[in-house]
Image: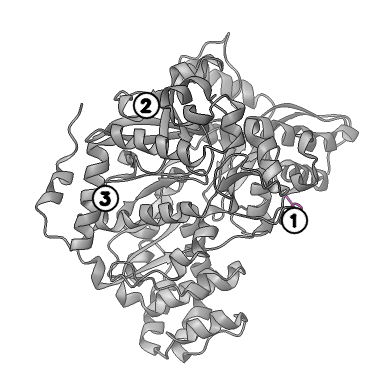
Amino acid sequence: MPEAPNFVQSWVTASVPEEHRKVLDYIEDVTVNADQVQRRVLSEILTQNAPAEYLHRHGLSGHATADLDAFKRLIPVITYEDLQPDILRIAHGDPSPILSGRPISEFLTSSGTSGGERKLMPTIHDELVRRSLFYSLMTPVMSQFVPGLDKGKAMYLYFVKSESRTPGGLVARPVLTSYYKSRHFLDRPFDPYNILTSPNEAILCSDSYQSMYAQLLCGLVQSADVVRVGAVFASGFLRATKFLEKHWPRLCCDIRTGMLDPQITDRTVREAVERVLRPDPGLAGHIEFECSKASWQGIIRRIWPNTKYIDIIVTGAMAQYIPTLEFYGGGLPLACTMYGSSECYFGINLNPMCKPSEVAYTLIPTMAYFEFLPVHHINKGAKDDDQRDLVDLVDVKLGQEYELVVTTYSGLYRYRVGDVLRVAGFKNKAPQFNFVRRKNVALSIDSDKTDEVELHAAVRNAVNHLEPFGASLVEYTSYADTSSIPGHYVLFWELKAGGTAVPPSVFEDCCLAAEESLNSVYRQGRVCDKSIGPLEIRVVEEGTFDKLMDCALSQGASINQYKAPRCVRSGPVVELLDGRVQSRFFSPKCPKWVPGHKQWSIDNGGI
């Protein structure tokens, strides 16, 4: 087993605050004893959830509930679609212990979708305690690499998203919104290592413009105190940078006069901002001087000169934003600290100042019971043998790729998360994983995840608008264009012309029809969050996809097995396609999106 990097060994002797030492000792203990901890966690989950109807249905009841071997023998490996009928029963108000022995307190809406709608992950009150514990691990780890975090503040840009209620009265909302609205976050004790520039009132403001404006203004006012900046996702941080680029004159006016812009109408936000806002013509002049320069390269360092790093998730789909972050950051390290989802929080990066390409997450054995499905098994497509092929946390092999499978305290059992991970090393007995990819995702700009099936349906619906003109689609591919902020989906279309020219307005209708066909997470990003730009269709010359095939064959692809890719990444392929673009069209307006969940109107048995 590879040795853990030397940096973790310094924890024993480094001079650290007592509270941090306790956290580091906790990490050491649960990783040294990862196998025993995992067995204990599974036993606790099964004991706590012994009344669950789901376990009884699969033959695990009575004394057998706590039988770990019986669990592995009887409980199947599942996906969200397998659980959906049970989840809808809970959503419609069935009080039975269907999945959990404890009451479901709310649903956490996943960025993944099923049938075009967000997945609903059941959770219980105790999970907030577990999430708070998880968050408490990160600062002590980071302090081993970056001294002086207790000497300044963090400009972390946090936002809440819309929520709804199920027919049974349970709240359904994203996991971060749930946490930011919880007492664990709002009533957190004073910690000199975690002082935020953003007031709670600004974070909780549901108006995205007012929330962003207030948080950036507070971060600018306190810029001399800021030692780290960040957001959850890279896309969100860049959206804030673009907001600053657009609104800096107004923000500077507020700082110069000490008077908050009247467009900020939320009373609680105004009161919170006015507690820190004072007239400061010198600071306003400095920000104005930097923002009015022709180039914004290094703008983060120039405005927040004491910043030591940018705390941001840049793995997975967020990796596409690394060059832009490096441009604005001016060489600031990109620290990627945690890995989690709506289903469960998984692991932390014990070497947070590493390069983005080297990020490896150590799974924390107390968060859930973890199992792993080898990727070679996934590729075979077999399902009946899933249970036999699963590998325990401490038995994964270095360099191998696995799909993550979790059993949680909230009532998910052997649930396939859909993330593919590669074993990069070990911290004691706990494996460290590189995030490889999200299974089946073709396009992603922000929290949206569009797979090939959804993409194909959207293209099919869009092409229908061409039929009256006799035009037809020869071939297509797609691309997540993040060269502008916000990024947007691009469809490259090669068409066979009909007898009548297709008006530009019809292509715009095609763009909108494609957007209307995409899932609710995408449409929320377009309409409400403004985190995704209008979809674009780029019509390419006849023969373009033949050229694309020639390029693939020249690089060793088999002509017998070649298929046009449904999604391409930036590089030579996109350059080839862009070089043959004849015309471009954008969606003329936002697609329809209504907060809520259309499945509420679906009968329990209709899924």
Residue mark closest to the camera, 1 vs 3: 1
Residue at image position (50%, 57%) is 236
User: Could you tell whether 140 is left or right of 600 in the image?
Assistant: left
Residue contact between numbered discs 1 and 3, judged by CB atoms under 8 Å: no
Q: Which residue is mark 3?
A: 353
Secondary structure mainly formed by the magenta segment: loop
Q: Which residue is mark 1?
A: 594
Res 471 → quadrant = top right
Residue at image position (39%, 89%) is 280
The residue positioned farthest toward the left in the image shown? 13
User: Could you tell whether 125 is left or right of 351 in the image?
Assistant: right
* Disc on the earlier residue, 2 or 1: 2
For disc 2, the neighbor class at 10 Å (few under 14, some 14 to 19, many from 20) is: some
- Look at the numbered disc 1 and give the secondary structure of its residue: loop
For disc 1, the neighbor class at 10 Å (few under 14, some 14 to 19, many from 20) is: few
Work out whether residue 69 can be spotted. Answer: yes
- Numbered circle sitting on residue 392: 2
* Disc on the earlier residue, 3 or 2: 3
The percent position of residue 197, horizontal first and vertical second, equals 40, 73
Amino acid carrying mark 1 in the image: Val
C-alpha separation, residue under disc 2 versus residue under disc 1: 42 Å
The percent position of residue 328, horizontal first and vertical second, equals 39, 59
Amino acid carrying mark 2 in the image: Asp
The percent position of residue 537, horizontal first and vertical second, equals 69, 41
Q: How many marks?
A: 3
Viewer-nearest residue: 454 or 63: 63
The residue positioned farthest toward the front in the image shown? 63
In the image, the segment drawn in magenta is 587-592
